[in-house]
Image: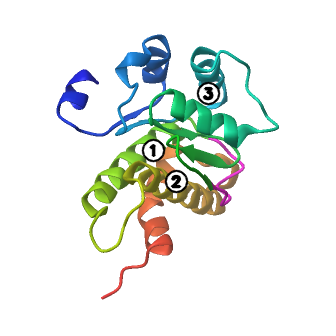
């Protein structure tokens, strides 16, 4: 993480990396190219550590905004029934339905997708009228493609859906969300 910061390279942190970051906030604090993708329990630990309080379910978007701001503009993609994203300046949501079946490894697909779209967005921001945050754009696109792929996989495999089935649907979901124009 330190090398990525020194090289000005975006980082996406999930799973065990979030445990490390929660115990050593300086690894990402004030690094605006960092994205954290916590699940419910990881988010709870971040809230307790950074804001020194419990999760507020009544005003969750404001608390997410405060958490991202408290980390100095780090982007947080809070995974859940809807995915909420904040960089401390704005909050976005991805509400499209994914799949009623959660598979181990979906978070890995999400992290990888966010990293790819963040990289692409970073190349485009500032060109052609794009003014949004590349981390926010990367998170929205990564969340949307995963949700669409999970939905397509579930249509085919139902309750036997595996992460590999979701991966197989990534191309089709990208085509549906962002059709290629010739």
Residue 59, label in figure? none
Decide: few, some or many residues near mark 2? Use Cα within 10 Å; few <14, some 14-19, many ≥20: many
Image quadrant assignment for residue 32: top left
Alpha carbons under labels 2 and 1: distance apart: 7 Å
Name the image quarter holding the N terminus. top left
Name the image quarter holding the C terminus. bottom left
Of callouts 3 and 1, the N-terminal one: 3
Foreground tag (3 vs 1): 3
Percent x, y for residue 22?
50, 17
Of callouts 2 and 3, the N-terminal one: 3
Q: Which residue is drawn at 25% across and 30% down?
A: 5
Q: Is residue 155 left or right of residue 114?
A: right
Foreground tag (2 vs 3): 3
- Whether tag 2 and tag 1 are in contact, CB under 8 A, the answer is yes
Alpha carbons under labels 2 and 3: distance apart: 20 Å
- Give the colour scheme shown: rainbow
Q: For residue 74: magenta?
A: no
Vertical side of 26 occupied by 154: above or below = below
In the rendered structure, which segment of residues is drawn in magenta? 94-102
Decide: few, some or many residues near mark 3? Use Cα within 10 Å; few <14, some 14-19, many ≥20: many
* Residue nearest the viewer, comparing 70 with 43: 70
Q: Which residue is drawn at 25% across and 22% down?
A: 2
Alpha carbons under labels 3 and 1: distance apart: 19 Å
Residue under label 3, please give it: 43
- Decide if residue 115 is in sight here: yes
Residue under label 2, please give it: 146
Q: In this view, does 135 lie to the left or right of 106?
A: left
Vertical side of 10 occupied by 20: above or below = above
Residue under label 1, please give it: 109
Of callouts 2 and 1, the N-terminal one: 1
* Residue nearest the viewer, comparing 68 with 114: 68
Circle 3: element type: helix
């Amino acid at each position: 993480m330190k090398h990525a910061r020194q090289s000005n390279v975006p980082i996406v942190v999930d799973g065990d990396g979030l445990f490390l970051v929660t115990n050593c906030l300086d690894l990402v604090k004030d690094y605006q190219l960092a994205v954290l993708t916590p699940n419910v329990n990881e988010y709870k630990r971040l809230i307790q550590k950074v804001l020194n309080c419990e999760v507020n379910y009544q005003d969750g978007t404001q608390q997410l905004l405060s958490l991202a701001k408290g980390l100095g503009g780090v982007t947080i993609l809070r995974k859940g029934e809807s995915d909420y994203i904040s960089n401390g300046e704005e909050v976005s949501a991805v509400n499209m339905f994914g799949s009623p079946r959660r598979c181990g490894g979906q978070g890995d697909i999400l992290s990888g997708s966010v990293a790819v779209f963040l990289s692409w967005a970073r190349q485009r921001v500032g060109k052609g009228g794009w003014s949004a945050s590349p981390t926010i754009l990367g998170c929205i696109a990564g969340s949307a493609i995963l949700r669409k792929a999970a939905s397509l996989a579930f249509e085919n495999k139902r309750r036997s859906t595996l992460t590999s089935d979701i991966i197989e649907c990534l191309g089709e979901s990208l085509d549906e969300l962002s059709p290629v124009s010739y």
